[in-house]
Amino acid sequence: MNGNPFLGWHYLWQGLLSLREPGLRRFVALPLLLNIVVMSAASWWGGSKLNGWIESLVAWLPGWLEWLYWLLMPLALLTMLLVMAYFFSTLLVTLGSPLNGLLSEQVERRAGVVLPEEPVLKMIRRTFGRELTKLGYLLPRYLLLLVLSFIPGLNLASPLLWFWFGSWVVALQYIDYSFDNHGRSFAEMRKAMAGDNLTVLSFGAVVAFLMMIPLVNWFVMPAAVIGATRLRLERLGQPGNVGGFGYAEGDTHRQRLADGSTEHSGR
């Protein structure tokens, strides 16, 4: 395991503080509006269904297992909350992928990274295509976890498994915007994340936790895009050549020019 498990909150907090930053405000507005609509609908739908699910669980328990009610109920409730949080989070980032891609791109430009210009329609096709790739990765794994959640004995560990894998997926969804803006493959992005997995998991865990808190979850998506992009810039940058620059080489290149040095000058 590599990385720093205490940095996840740091990067999300940076994202929250940046929501009103003048250069980012107009790129935050639409993702924020989408987040409010989807998460409000999710909270209303989940609240209306939760009682029915609890009653179904009670009816499913045989009479001789009624004593397990107080053990199974908290686990079942937590599992349901996690499943709903991850389902609506996935729906949210899929619908908002073009807007989130633009926001991530703007964060990088403000950090000095040079990115090639791209027509809007091409960018929309690219981001939605990438979301399909992500769905192909996570849906089979989510289905496996869902099956495990109904197997007696194994389902006792299901909240932990949901939270662990869900934290990884949430981080993956937001970090990938920056990688995709640079034309990096999905496999390359996962490999880079694995090299700093404690930092990545802690970031995803904080985002996943805040997604379950009504009203607070309105602001999570745009903050997570900003925080994940900065996490990628500072901790997951790899050599590359996009528009003549690597991932975060814009500032370094300008500094060399200001110093009168070049890559081959020996300075």
Image (tube, rainbow, N blue to C red):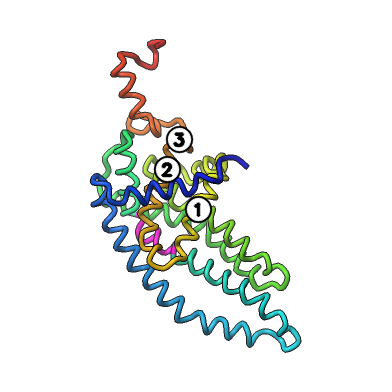
Query: Quick check: 1 left or right of 19?
Result: right
Left or right: 39 as drawn, with respect to 154: left
Examine the residues drawn in magenta and state their main secondary structure. Answer: helix
Q: Position of residue 202 (x, y in %)?
A: 53, 50
Which mark sits nearer the N-terminus, 3 or 1?
A: 1
Q: Which residue is identified by label 2?
A: 179
**In what quadrant of the picture does the C terminus appear?**
top left
Foreground tag (3 vs 1):
1
Three-letter amino acid code at the position of disc 2? Phe
Query: Which residue is at a point 37% across and 29% down the rendered structure image?
Result: 249
Q: Quadrant of residue 88?
A: bottom left
What amino acid does circle 3 point to? Gly
Mark 1 or mark 2, earlier in chain: 2
Residue placed at 42% from the left, 55% from the top?
Answer: 131
Residue 7 against residue 219 in the figure, above or below? above
> Mark 2 or mark 3, which has the lower sequence index?
2
The residue lying toward the viewer, choosing from 143 and 213, is 213
Q: Which label sits on residue 58?
A: none
Name the residue beneath numbered marker 1.
Answer: 204
To which residue does mark 3 refer?
Answer: 237
Q: Is residue 67 above or below residue 167?
A: below
Image: magenta residue range: 89-97
| Residue 92 within the segment the image draws in magenta | yes
- In the image, what residue occupies the spot 31% across and 54% down? 99
Report the Cα–Cα distance between label 2 and label 3: 9 Å
x then y, percent, for residue 23: 24, 44
The reply to whether the magenta stretch includes residue 226 is no
Q: Position of residue 250 (x, y in %)?
A: 33, 29
